[in-house]
Structure formats: structure tokens, C-alpha cells
Image (spheres, rainbow, N blue to C red):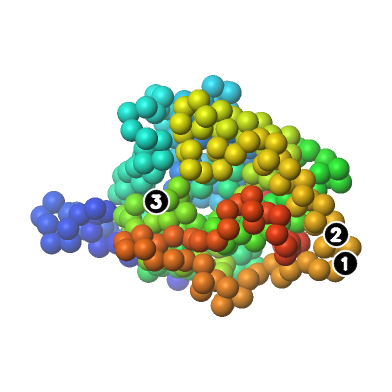
Amino acid sequence: MKWRGRRETAPGADAGADAAPAATGRPSADGLPRVAVITMSRDSGPVLRHWVAHYQRQLGVDDVFVVDDHSVDGSTDDLPCTVLRLPYLDKYPFEPSRMGIVSGLATSLLFAYDAVLLADADEFVVADPAKHATLRHFAAARAGSEVAGVLGYNVIHRVGVEPALDFDAPSLLRQREFARFTPLMCKPALKWVDAAWAHASHGIRHPFAPDPELFMFHLKFADVGQLELLAEHRHQAAVVEGRAVKSSWSRPTDEIVEALRTAAAQVEQAEAQGELGRFRPGPKKLASIVQNEGDLWRATGAGQHLALVRPPYVRIPDEFRDTI
């Protein structure tokens, strides 16, 4: 059975307005919905090229969009995808600017695509490989949905046990075994409707829930060397430029790196003592993650660094290891 589009009017338009064109619901050539992905990146390093390749495999070579937030490290040079280069963002505060830019771009893309995915440059979203071949197959299976949240996992580098990530290798998850399920990272990543992301993309102005068949592997803590570089860059941006001062960006670099080293040691202890947690959270846990605040729905829970040093840790199942 071929997927059929669900949208009846253009995004952001009144269904009764003369200017609102009716969507055809015409599927793409392969019968699957069209899905675009957006990231906003500044000096993301080698992970960005792997991010582009991942989503091109999942969605299509022309369906990946990188918003370059004034990078100077060369990470956005010669990428095989659409790159929108921005000037230095100083007109408005950083976080409202970032959410406004990605939400506005998504609104535009929904005139051409059936759904839009938002993921940071170190966030890799995959559907359950036992049930969906790609993210487009997942989107087809969720026809009629409006917003889908991910199950968020912080991948952990066991410092001193596992080598540095080889970003040229075919698989990144084959190089890492453990992660920490983090409710705060269960973001409303995939949307079919014109609703604005908020709260640093942990929230959206539309009801949503984490989907038990949609996973996000966050690689911020997957390599201690890259973490140190990123943390220092963000700390300087917070201190010197006043960017995201209420977020983890303002934390000192050594504090963030120490959180990873603590987590790595605790993973070793948990594995040795047979105290690893279950990979897939139960329905009761999932139902408690999203909080509604007026017109905003957002994922809640301990901050990433605090959650990282708290068990339980989980082993990444083998069926996911070749997806990223």
C-alpha cells in the first residue's frame, strides 16, 4: 500500500483562506513521504560530515539542510548538501534567534516536504531497525501523526578503554558499547505540522510524546577529545559573547570532561557487577517525560551532565550498532 499525504492546507495558513493551497497528497516516486532534516551548526568538527552522510542515507541526498552559524573551523566547507550561511547572530539574543531560524525554515520546507526533522550536529535519529528500514519508512508508518518525540540516549566514551572515535569509519556506534537514557533528550524532533520548536529544541508548541520506535543517539559524550574541544568553544561563547548563558554552555570545560570520566568509571563498575539497566524504557516512564506548560510541551528531567553521572547505564543493542 502506498503512503498518502495527510496535509489539507499549507503550513501556517487558515484552512478557509483563499490563499491556502490544497495539498495534493501525492507521494514521492518510491511511494514514501518526503522528509527533510535541519541542523544549525557552529564549529561542530568532524562529526558534522558523518551527520550529513547519515541523514542522506536515511532520507535522500537532497533532503539535508545545514544552517551554518558563522563557523570558522571549516566543518561546513564543501559539504554535499544544502548549506545556508548566516552572518554573526547579534541582532537578537542567541536562543530565540536559533529557534526562530530553524522553526521558520521548517515552516518553509513543509510547503515541499511532508515532515521535517530537527537534530543537532551530534544527534543521530534512527527508527527501530527491526520495524522500519529508514526514517522515511517510519514516517509512512506514522501517517496522520503531528509530532513525534525521540528516545534520547547519551552515548558514553569509556575513557581509557575505548580509543578515540574514528569519524572515517563506516560505523560510529560499532566503536561504542554503552549509553545513558536521558529523558531531557527525548526531544520533539520530527513534525508533520507547522509548530514552533522552543526551549532549546527540547520543547514545541504542540502536544507530543516520545515514540517507542524512534531513537536518538547523542554523541556529545562519545569522545573525550571532541568533548573537550566543544566544551571549551561553548564556554568561551557563553563567557565572551553571552550565548546560552543559562545552559550547559556556561559550565567550565574541566567540569564537563570530569562528568564523562565519572560516568565512564561507573559504566565499568555497573557492567562488572551486572547492574546495567534495560535499554527500552517502559510505558510508565515514557508517559512521565513530557510536561505541558501553557502552549508549550517539553521534555523534562535532570540536565545532561547531572544525568550522565547517575546510573542506570545501558548496553546499546547490536541491531543499532550499524545504523550510525
Q: Residue beneath label 3, please?
A: 198
Q: Residues within 10 Å of mark 3 (few under 14, many from 20)?
A: many
Q: Amino acid at mark 3?
A: Ala
Res 82 seen here: no
Side (left or right) of 278 relative to 272? left
Which percent across, then down, holds residue 273?
A: 88, 67
Query: Quadrant location of residue 146?
Result: bottom left
What residue lies at 17% left-to-right and 58% top-to-bottom? 14
Residue located farthest toward the right when viewing the structure as drawn: 272
Q: Tell me the amino acid under the disc marked 1.
A: Gln
Q: Residues within 10 Å of mark 1 (few under 14, many from 20)?
A: few
- Report the disc number at residue 273: 1
Per the image, label 3 sits on a secondary structure element best described as strand
Q: Is residue 104 left or right of residue 228?
A: left
Q: Position of residue 132 (x, y in %)?
A: 58, 64
> How far is mark 2 from mark 1, CA to CA?
6 Å
Question: Mark 2–mark 1 contact, CB under 8 Å?
Answer: yes
Disc 3 versus disc 2: distance between alpha carbons? 37 Å
Which residue is under mark 2? 269
Query: At x 56% / y 77%, what residue is drawn?
Result: 284
Task: Answer whether labels 1 and 3 touch (C-beta < 8 Å).
Answer: no
Q: Is residue 313 left or right of residue 45?
A: right
85 shown above or below 217: above
Q: Nearer the viewer, mark 3 or mark 2?
A: 2
Nearest the camera: 26 or 56?
A: 56
Label annotation for residue 176: none
Question: Mark 3 vs mark 2: which is more N-terminal?
Answer: 3
The vertical placement of 107 against 285, above or below, is: above
Whole-percent x and y of residue 288?
51, 72
